[in-house]
Amino acid sequence: MLEVLMLYYVVILMASVILDTVLGEPRGIFIKTHPVVISGNIAFKLFKPGNKLFGILLWFISVIPIMIIYYLIPRILIMVNVVVGIIVYAYILKLTFSIKLMRNYAKRILRNIESGNLDKARMLTQEIVRRNVWDLDTPHLISAVIESLAESFVDGILSPLFYFALLGLPGALLQRLSNTMDSVVGYKGWPYEDVGWFSARVDTVLNYIPARLSSVIIAVASALMGLNWRNSIKVAIHEHDNVKSINSGWPMASFAGALEIMLEKVGVYRINGGIMVPDAAKLRLAIKLFDFAVIITLIIISASLILRVFFIPLFI
């Protein structure tokens, strides 16, 4: 029984990664059935200026029903046909994380920078960051991409898989949908601040441990690549709080330390200041560091799943 559960989980995890690698993000009609899209649309349509109590209600309405539905679909299918159920389970798990999307963005931006097409590089970068990239010089443009790559490693990969290892598919869905709610309403200032307060807090709490775990993983990845892993740890510890977010600073500072570069959002924060600014070669190295960190994460999550099944022999 234990061996079967362990096999199920490892197969599901690997299948979800393969689906992400092969299919990437859903397109066409499939995007309309994406739990993130549905949850975001519910929140968008129901949103109105209000107090914190309304914000809590909005979060529960937008997250919990979708989480339950998308958990029950594969569970019911497994009872009908195990193979079909496992495939659907893996597909829904894939919808909670994204390895290919951010990696492809970074590679496309790198190609355009190296070919001298900075306008195209800026256009692509603007799709993944909120800051105005059109006034940035090349080093600060590259910095924005590396920062996004580091943040995406936690928000889009490590965190949902961490909660998958801990709580199964409901955990991964909870993290992904909570992150979506933070993106939709978790802003400061009117009309979002009170309504988005709960969504922002939940996202912060859920990412607290994964963000710090990311620094350990990035340090290990740095060591395997022959990068400055000691500096990765040093900068993460001493400069993570240069960023206002209590979570985002950890992976960003770890990347900056390992790559021995300065990351800067002009007028907002600077990490590892006084060091060389990033260039195209450092961006290429950052993508490789991202890849190594993802591989290490998958190994850790696989081991964690096996360990959890050993102590709690339940298929969640």
Image (tube, rainbow, N blue to C red):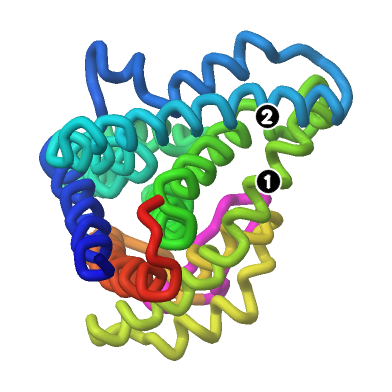
Q: Are marks 1 and 2 in contact (CB under 8 Å)?
A: yes
* Dot label at residue 245: none
| Residue at x-position 45% and y-position 81% | 232
Query: Is residue 131 shown to the viewer in this render?
Result: no
The picture quadrant where one finds residue 164 is bottom left
10 Å crowding of disc 1: few (<14), some (14-19), many (20+): some
10 Å crowding of disc 2: few (<14), some (14-19), many (20+): many
Residue 42 is situated, as x and y percent measured from the top left of the image, at 57, 15
Which residue type carries mark 1? Val
Closer to us: 193 or 287? 193
Closer to us: 287 or 311? 311
Verify whether residue 243 appears in magenta.
Answer: no
* Dot label at residue 202: 1
Q: In this view, does 224 lie above or below 63?
A: below
Tell me the SS state at disc 2.
Answer: helix
Which residue type carries mark 2? Trp
Verify whether residue 273 appears in magenta.
Answer: yes
Q: Is residue 92 left or right of residue 176?
A: left
Tell me the SS state at disc 1.
Answer: helix
The picture quadrant where one finds residue 8 is bottom left
Q: Please report the bounds of the magenta region as a residue range.
A: 258-274
| Residue at x-position 45% and y-position 79% | 216
Compare marks 1 and 2 and give the one earlier in the sequence.
Answer: 2
Spatial CA span between label 1 and label 2: 10 Å
Closer to us: 273 or 259? 259
Q: Is residue 288 above or below residue 310?
A: above
Q: Is residue 269 above or below residue 118?
A: below
Which residue bears the numbered disc 2?
59
